[in-house]
Every structure is written in C-alpha cells, then in structure tokens.
Image (cartoon, helix red, strand yellow):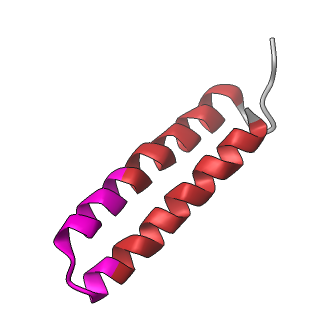
Amino acid sequence: MNLLMVIFGLIAIFGVVGIFQSIKEKNILAVLFNAAAAGVFGWFVIMTILNQGYPPVHQ
C-alpha cells in the first residue's frame, strides 16, 4: 500500500500539472478529466494517510 500511495500521489500531481497545461491550450474537456483524476487520486492518498498514517500501520 505504501508504494501505491506514492504512485497515486504522482498521478494526482501530474493531473494538477495537466490542468494548467490544458487551460493554457484552452481545452475544456482535458481540464475536466485532469481535475477529476487529480481529485479522485488525491482524495484517495489523503484519506489513506489520515486513516493508516505514513508509514502505514498494519494491524
């Protein structure tokens, strides 16, 4: 789960970068998809860290 959080965090960061690039190119559909990806993956990472801590505690 530890490496998966890192990968999902990178996807969220790349989604935020993609939002700015697609705004620059005036591509509304890309803005929506990048915002959705950044939101979903970022929320998963934040809630996993809040729930299990970092590094995760296995019970």
**Image quarter hosting the N terminus:** top right
Q: Please tell me which residue lies in front, 2 or 28.
A: 28
> Residue placed at 67% from the left, 43% from the top?
5
In the rendered picture of this protein, how many numbered marks are placed on residues? Answer: 0
**Image location (x, y in percent) of residue 3:** 76, 43
The magenta stretch spans residue 27: yes
Q: Is residue 31 above or below residue 10?
A: below
**Image check: 16 left or right of 1?**
left
**Image location (x, y in percent) of residue 31:** 27, 68
**Image check: 55 left or right of 42?**
right
**Image check: 52 left or right of 35?**
right
Q: Magenta stretch? A: 22-36
**Image check: 51 left or right of 29?**
right
> Residue placed at 81% from the left, 18% from the top?
58
**Image quarter hosting the C terminus:** top right
Q: Quadrant of residue 56?
A: top right
Question: Looking at this rendering, what residue extends furthest in the bottom direction?
Answer: 24
> Residue placed at 59% from the left, 48% from the top?
8
> Residue placed at 70% from the left, 50% from the top?
6
**Image location (x, y in percent) of residue 55:** 81, 37
The magenta stretch spans residue 12: no
**Image location (x, y in percent) of residue 22:** 31, 78
Q: Main secondary structure of the magenta part?
A: helix
Q: Is residue 35 above or below residue 51?
A: below
Q: Please tell me which residue lies in front, 3 or 56.
A: 3
